[in-house]
């Protein structure tokens, strides 16, 4: 293997995005780019016929415009059709919402998604 090939392989491996990164991108798009991801955890999940991961995520929407985007996010998430290559979003649930008005408008949303490997 030449030096150029070895360098190219390393760059390719570093830039490859997994399901977690693709999910964060999809959630950010659904939130109209107005959410800040505070926390994202993932744990393996499997049944007799399926395998995948359960993702727990906490998003913050700061300001009035962001809070409006957050309200839209809350309404749309459970039925949203995600397009994540190689993955099927089998379940998307809002676990909790914390909405504060003072001193600034802030909406914090905790959600959980079950991603299954799509064969």
Image: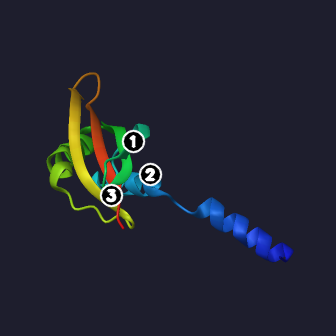
Q: Residues within 10 Å of mark 1 (few under 14, many from 20)?
A: some
Front label number (2 vs 3):
2
Q: Point out the tag, 2 or 1, that comes first from the N-terminus.
A: 2
Q: Residue 59 is drawn in which quadrant?
A: top left
Circle 2 is placed at which residue position?
Answer: 20
| Residue drawn at (44%, 56%) of the image | 19
Q: Nearer the viewer, residue 106 or 76?
A: 76
Q: Residue 4 is drawn in which quadrant?
A: bottom right
Q: Is residue 39 above or below residue 50?
A: above
Q: CA distance from mark 2 to mark 1?
A: 15 Å
Q: Position of residue 73 (x, y in %)?
A: 22, 48
Q: Position of residue 93 (x, y in %)?
A: 21, 42
Q: Position of residue 24 (x, y in %)?
A: 40, 51
Residue 95 falls left or right of residue 37: left
Q: Residues within 10 Å of mark 3 (few under 14, many from 20)?
A: few
Quarter in which the N terminus is drawn: bottom right
Residue 80 falls left or right of residue 85: left
Q: CA distance from mark 2 to mark 3?
A: 14 Å
The tally of labels here is: 3
Circle 1 is placed at which residue position?
Answer: 36
Please, what secondary structure does the residue beneath circle 3 have?
A: helix
Q: Point out the tag, 3 or 1, that comes first from the N-terminus.
A: 3
Q: Is residue 60 above or below residue 34?
A: above
Q: Position of residue 75 (x, y in %)?
A: 14, 47
| Residue drawn at (29%, 55%) of the image | 32
Q: Nearer the viewer, residue 30 or 102?
A: 30
| Residue drawn at (29%, 35%) of the image | 110
Tag on residue 29?
3
Quarter in which the C terminus is drawn: bottom left
Q: Point out the tag, 2 or 3, that comes first from the N-terminus.
A: 2
Q: Residue 60 is drawn in which quadrant?
A: top left
Front label number (2 vs 1):
2
């Amino acid at each position: 293997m030449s030096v150029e090939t070895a360098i190219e392989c390393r760059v390719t491996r570093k830039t490859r995005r997994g399901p977690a990164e693709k999910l964060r991108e999809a959630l950010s798009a659904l939130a109209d780019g107005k959410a800040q991801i505070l926390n994202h955890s993932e744990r393996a999940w499997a049944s007799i016929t399926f395998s995948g991961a359960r993702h727990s995520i906490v998003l913050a929407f700061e300001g009035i415009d962001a809070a409006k985007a957050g309200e839209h996010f809350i309404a749309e998430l459970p039925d949203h059709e995600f397009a994540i290559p190689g993955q099927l979003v089998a379940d998307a649930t809002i676990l909790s919402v914390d909405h504060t008005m003072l001193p600034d408008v802030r909406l914090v949303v905790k959600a959980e998604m079950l991603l299954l490997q799509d064969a």
